Amino acid sequence: MENIAANLKKVLATLPDGVRLVAVSKFHPVEELREAYDAGQRIFGESHVQELQRKVTEMPSDVQWHFIGHLQTNKVKYLAPYVTMIHAVDSLKLLQEIDRQAAKHDRVIDVLLELHIAEEATKYGFSPDDCRELLASGVWRELQHVRICGLMMMATYTDDTAQIRREMATAQQLFDEFKTNFFADEDSFKERSWGMSHDYPIAIETGATFVRIGTTIFGERTY
């Protein structure tokens, strides 16, 4: 049996000021989330809409739910009433749908634009050029119920730490570029979400403000 509270404490002890933990709780039962909650964790990351819908009703109301998986536009309406942040926005169409659904609930939903930097075809996200093009178009500025707060990426799953560091450093360079060119006056554009259980120390070194850690805290998925 995992000692979730002890694992959580160990992870938090490694995070410097300015880096927040998203406890990746997908495929783990509410009882395990409650252990982390009772130990002080408030930000939880889920990637399946139906699972998240169920957990929202069973967890305390001050939990901040971050949706970290690939999100289809037709599922946005289910998240719009309560999600705190959507990490993996990978198209203008999705951005516009989040805005549309958030408006129905008179909310502004924080989002991160997902970059595809990793050398894996299975990853989602904007190429750097596509992301640059979207931001340069200015269309996103018309959206009143969505707020772009930064960037998200997943590094290649590899033991090659030099490659992981290179990919994360590229994401940080793009963050700096976009901040300067498009968000210089936007204090809210400050978040960088990269790093998981196996590579989050490198993420911290390369500017991450959110690290998404599940296995190190909860152990292997339960279902």
Image (cartoon, rainbow, N blue to C red):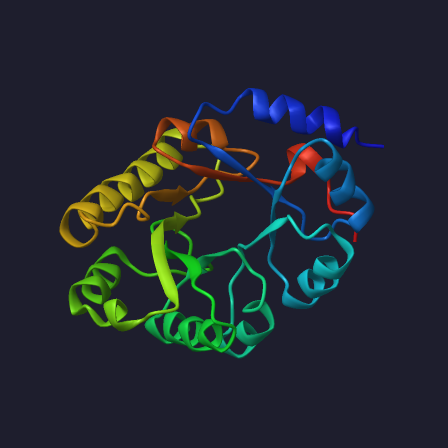
Asked if 120 appears above or below 168 in the picture, the reply is: below
Compare residues 147 and 194 and report the one nearer the observer: 147
The location of residue 64, given as percent across then percent down, is 59, 49
Name, please, the residue furthest toward the front.
106
Residue at the spot x=19%, y=65% of the render? 133
Q: Is residue 7 above or below residue 68?
A: above
Report the front residue among 169 and 164. 169
Which quadrant would residue 144 be assigned to in this image? bottom left
Residue 66 at x, y = what percent? 55, 53
Q: Residue at x 33, y 41 (%)?
A: 167
Q: Residue at x 19, y 49 (%)?
A: 185
- Res. 165 image quadrant: top left
Residue 50 shown left or right of residue 190 in the figure: right
Q: Quadrant of the N terminus?
A: top right
Which residue sits furthest right?
1
Q: Is residue 175 left or right of residue 90?
A: left
Residue 78 on image: x %, y %: 60, 73
Residue 100: x and y, percent? 43, 77
123 or 147: nearer the viewer: 147
In-image side of 36 versus 81 (left or right): right
Q: How many marks?
A: 0
* Residue 102 visible, this orientation: yes
**Vertical order, 92 against 184 (above or below):** below
Viewer can see residue 219: no
